[in-house]
Image (tube, grey):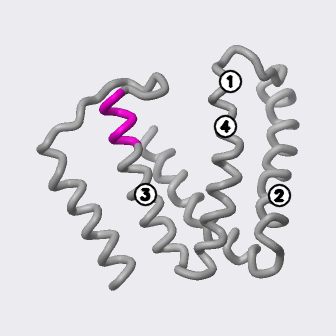
């Protein structure tokens, strides 16, 4: 079931990047980023207490994890801006490459409590294939 959810997440991400790029044509980057996060916040402020029947609290986790808000705004803003100039496919391809590289580093060293999964030299061909595929998608 997790694979289905991840595929759905990828589909939603592609749609979001395309729509954000289009929204950026009509509004400034900052206004567009505000819209995205404002509506998400409203939905969650209603969903969490009503559907999950939980109180929203900001305690119980290390303070550095709250940087996720800054990262979210940055991702939406940067991907929307870049989509207008290089297109959604290139944005998402390069984004995936960045995610793979950083995730491999986090896995290898176990940064931020991530399960430590050592890098193996046998993985290098897979990384090379992904990089070649991204280059073909972008330049093809």
Can you identify the residue that label 1 sits on? 63
State the mark number for residue 67: 4
Query: Local crowd at mark 4 within 10 Å, few (<14), some, or many (≥20)?
Result: few
Q: Nearer the viewer, mark 2 or mark 4?
A: 4
Q: Who's the residue at 82% across and 24% down the image?
A: 56
| Residues at marks 4 and 1, CA–CA distance in whole angstroms | 8 Å
Can you identify the residue that label 3 sits on? 96
| Residues at marks 3 and 4, CA–CA distance in whole angstroms | 20 Å
Farthest residue, direction left: 122
Q: Who's the residue at 54% across and 79% down the image?
A: 87
Residues at circles 3 and 2 in contact by the CB criterion of under 8 Å: no
Secondary structure beneath label 3:
helix
- Left or right, 107 with respect to 28, comes to left
Bounds of the magenta segment = 103-109
| Residues at marks 1 and 2, CA–CA distance in whole angstroms | 23 Å
Farthest residue, direction bottom: 140
User: First in sequence: mark 3 or mark 4?
Assistant: 4
Query: Local crowd at mark 3 within 10 Å, few (<14), some, or many (≥20)?
Result: some
Q: Residue 106 in magenta? A: yes
Can you identify the residue that label 2 sits on? 34
Q: Nearer the viewer, mark 3 or mark 4?
A: 4
């Amino acid at each position: 079931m997790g694979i289905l959810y991840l595929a759905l997440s990828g589909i939603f991400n592609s749609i979001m990047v395309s729509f954000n790029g289009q929204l950026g044509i009509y509004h400034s980057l900052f206004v567009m980023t505000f819209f995205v996060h404002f509506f998400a916040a409203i939905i969650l402020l209603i969903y969490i207490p009503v559907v999950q029947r939980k109180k929203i609290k900001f305690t119980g986790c290390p303070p550095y994890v709250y940087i996720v808000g800054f990262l979210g705004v940055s991702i939406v803003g940067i991907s929307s801006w870049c989509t207008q100039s290089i297109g959604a496919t290139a944005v998402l391809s390069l984004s995936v490459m960045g995610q793979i590289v950083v995730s491999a580093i986090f896995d290898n060293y176990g940064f931020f409590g991530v399960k430590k999964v050592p890098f193996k030299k046998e993985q290098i061909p897979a990384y090379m294939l992904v990089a070649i595929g991204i280059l073909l998608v972008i330049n093809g």
